[in-house]
Amino acid sequence: MKCQCGGEFEFALARNVQQLLFPKSSPSCHWCCFGVKNHMANGVGGDFFEFLTLPDGSQSVFLGDVTGHGLHASVVMSLLYGFIHRACLKSCVPLEAVLETNEFLQSFAERSQKYDHFFSSTLFFGSIHPETLEMHYINCGHLPPMVRRGDQLFTLNSTGPPIGFFDHPDIEMRSFRFEKDDRLLLYTDGISEAVNAEGVMFGLRRLSQLLMTSDLNYLEFLDEIFAELKRFGACNPPQDDCTAIVIDFHPFMAPMSKPENLPE
């Protein structure tokens, strides 16, 4: 019993430490609104996200999903989170930061063939220039973010493999120019691959339909995604970490939103 209590305490401590890493508020921008919602499957996990202002004034957003979930994923996630912060202090170019991060993960993977696959992650990394609304981005094996523009839907598809697998990965940087009233949705596979009791997957089609038909504001839309998962009958607690980020592009100053972690 003593050991169990000690284990529960250590687990709770790990969860609290991981929560300290996540941003406590979204960026305050006159040109867009940021919102994020996150629910870890086991209290701790491998989803990670951040909003950083780069040295050139661009606003970056990154979202990643470390291989696996639980305690081991949270350890790798913490390493990645800290290193990406460090890389962004030196470079405003997403490709340079991502390649440096890949090399960092590879240095750990080389230490053990038994655990090398754990030192890998999907990663979407975008840098948005506030004056032009042009985003330079890298998508390393992450599910494609979606952009709603009126009745049009754009997807930002993969530009390279997940980081950590290859010494010299073939990664391409692309660009996308946003317009006023666009909505950008980023998400992890804990949402799109959620399964109900009948074994049916929530899927990208349902998620894209939700994006295209919703007239809610960005924070209400985040709530609606998780409410729709519940109505769908997805497992609660979820089988995998779930994170969604919404960015609405507006010509006015938006109030800051506080990232929300759903209760256990």
Image (tube, helix red, strand yellow):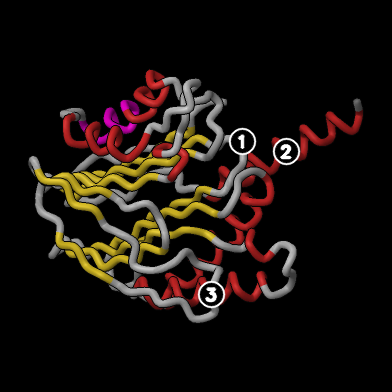
Whichever of callouts 3 and 2 sits on the residue coming sooner in the sequence is: 2
- Which numbered disc, 3 or 1, marks the residue closer to the eye? 3
Quadrant where the C terminus is found in the figure: top right
- Structural distance between the alpha carbons of marks 3 and 2: 32 Å
Where residue 171 sits in the image (x, y, percent)?
38, 74
The reply to whether dot 3 and dot 2 touch (C-beta < 8 Å) is no
111 left or right of 176?
Answer: right
Q: Amino acid at mark 3?
A: Phe
Q: Secondary structure at mark 2?
A: helix
Residue at 50% x, 70% y: name it: 86
| Label 1: element kind | loop
Q: Residue at x 20, y 28 (%)?
A: 216
**Percent x, y of residue 233:** 44, 20
Residue receiving disc 2: 11
Check if mark 2's residue and mark 1's residue have beta carbons within 8 Å. Answer: yes
Residue 229 or residue 100, whichever sits in front:
229
Q: Which residue is mark 1?
A: 43
Residue 89 in sight here: no
- Residue 166: mark in rendering: 3
260 horizontally vs 213: left or right: right
Residue 220 is covered by the magenta coloring: yes
